[in-house]
Amino acid sequence: HSAQEMIYCLDRLLSLPEVFHRIERELDAPESSLEDVARLISNDPALSTRLLHVANSAMFGFPSRITTVTRAVQLLGLRQVRDLSLAILVTSTFGDPGAEGFDARAYWRASVLRAVASTDLARSSGMAEPERLFLLGLLADIGHMVMYLTIPDEARFAEQRAIATHQPLHVSERQIIGCDYGEVGAALLSQWRLPDSFARAVASQFEPRLAGNGAREASIIYLANQIALADREGRTSSEIIEDCDPSVWELTSLEPSEISSIRASAELGLAAALAVFFPR
């Protein structure tokens, strides 16, 4: 199977709610304004309520309460509002895709932890707008959802094979399926017209050096993956460091000694982030 084949067989994931496409068109318009984007979001009560909830959360820590979408857009900026709107719509629309054998609760817990860890890693590495890495971390594993919705038997077999042979999951997927979940996720992000650097980072999250100008983002996702995997398997931060590709430290300007505190911060912020994106 190819990544493109899988996403094009899945109209459900390709078809985001219409409000997102309206926001996209507005942002692409030469005369786009904060007021017009705020109006579009305000016309969707569910999205506007969730956006205000996110804007007032500890993720951003604004000193005073934000009560209007217009104010949220002014403070967050158009690009951040677009990213948050997509994160809200993806988690609300595909929170439980109903795929056979797909553990939605475990999947989103790991995805949100990766998203929080990506933000903390980006901030520690000195990246501008580190909050943008939240969306990238949240969607880095979405290729797995696509696989379970299109080829569930092969997706499960690849996971079982990886466990039995003690090899990385993406290697097992390439052998059995013909592509890995990073490639599938990257194809979907490109279809959703996210920045090219995001798609490259997701495709190269196992080998960040191959991501070109997205290598720094890919390295952050690589490290966030290690934190999420360690959380799931009960591994220590020292074990994370031992297993890491040495090149990620140079690409991120991070020191191995920082991983323990970044992991602790991400795990501390996990519950709050889950409550924001999965209020029920």
Image (cartoon, grey):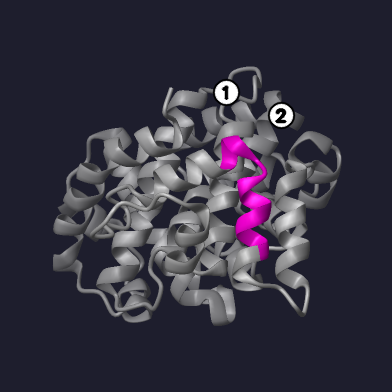
Residue toward you, 30 or 7: 30
Q: Which residue is mark 2?
A: 149
Position of residue 221 relative to residue 196, above or below, is above
Residue 45 is labelled as none
Kind of element beneath mark 1: loop
Q: What amino acid is labelled 1 in the image?
A: Phe
Kind of element beneath mark 2: helix
Q: Which residue is mark 1?
A: 102
Q: Which percent across, then down, holds residue 266? A: 25, 49
Quadrant that contains the N terminus: top right
Crowding near the residue tagged with mark 2, few <14, some 14–19, many ≥20 C-alpha atoms within 10 Å = many
Q: Quadrant of residue 278?
A: top left
- Specify whether 119 is left or right of 73: left
Q: Tell me which residue sits at (57%, 23%) in the image.
A: 102
Residue toward you, 64 or 102: 64
Residue toward you, 189 or 218: 189
